[in-house]
Amino acid sequence: MSERIIEPIRPTAVMAMSTDDRTYYTHLEDNPSGNSFFERLRIDAVDTQFIKDSDMMIAALPFSLPFVPKESVVSIGDVVLISNDRIGICLKNTAGSYVKIGRIRDVPDVDRLDVNLSLEWSE
């Protein structure tokens, strides 16, 4: 009879963007900015406010992340770094110099959004 090797399931983390009535989830990109953001959120959750500004909803972060932007086209729902301490949610397809760190579905259609950014782990 052959022995079965069972590998343990390892928990994975997703970034949760929680509002009063909804939570949006994204896997953080495997790049220096996404990895650094993950490490910051492991320490503590972040409260911030996204404000609609033309093509994006933009929020300030209380810390800096590595920011080496590339000229690219981003899509609706992409979560991007705009600078080392500003994050955006794309409201329409647009070109610019960004660092993509994630993507959400069902982009909110509001002018202002109070959000708690945290990590949630699978079981």
Image: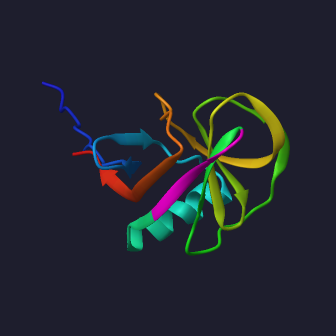
Q: Residue at x 48, y 35 (%)?
A: 108
Q: Residue at x 59, y 75 (%)?
A: 63
The colouring scheme, among rainbow, by chain, secondary structure or one colour, is: rainbow
Q: Residue at x 27, y 45 (%)?
A: 122
Q: Is residue 85 magenta?
A: no
- Which of 59 and 83 lies nearest the eye of the viewer? 59
- Which of 91 and 43 lies nearest the eye of the viewer? 91
* Left or right side of 14 for 33: right
26 vs 76: above or below: below
In the rendered image, residue 8, in percent from the top left (x then y), is placed at 24, 45
96 vs 118: above or below: above
Q: Which quadrant of the view contains residue 35? A: bottom right
Q: Residue at x 43, y 67 (%)?
A: 46
In the rendered image, residue 25, in percent from the top left (x then y), is placed at 41, 41
- Which of 112 and 48 lies nearest the eye of the viewer? 112
In the rendered image, residue 7, in percent from the top left (x then y), is placed at 27, 41
- Which of 48 and 13 lies nearest the eye of the viewer? 48
- Residue stretch in magenta: 48-54
In the rendered image, residue 68, in percent from the top left (x then y), is placed at 80, 59
- Quadrant into which the N terminus falls: top left
Q: Residue furthest right?
A: 71
- Quadrant into which the C terminus falls: top left
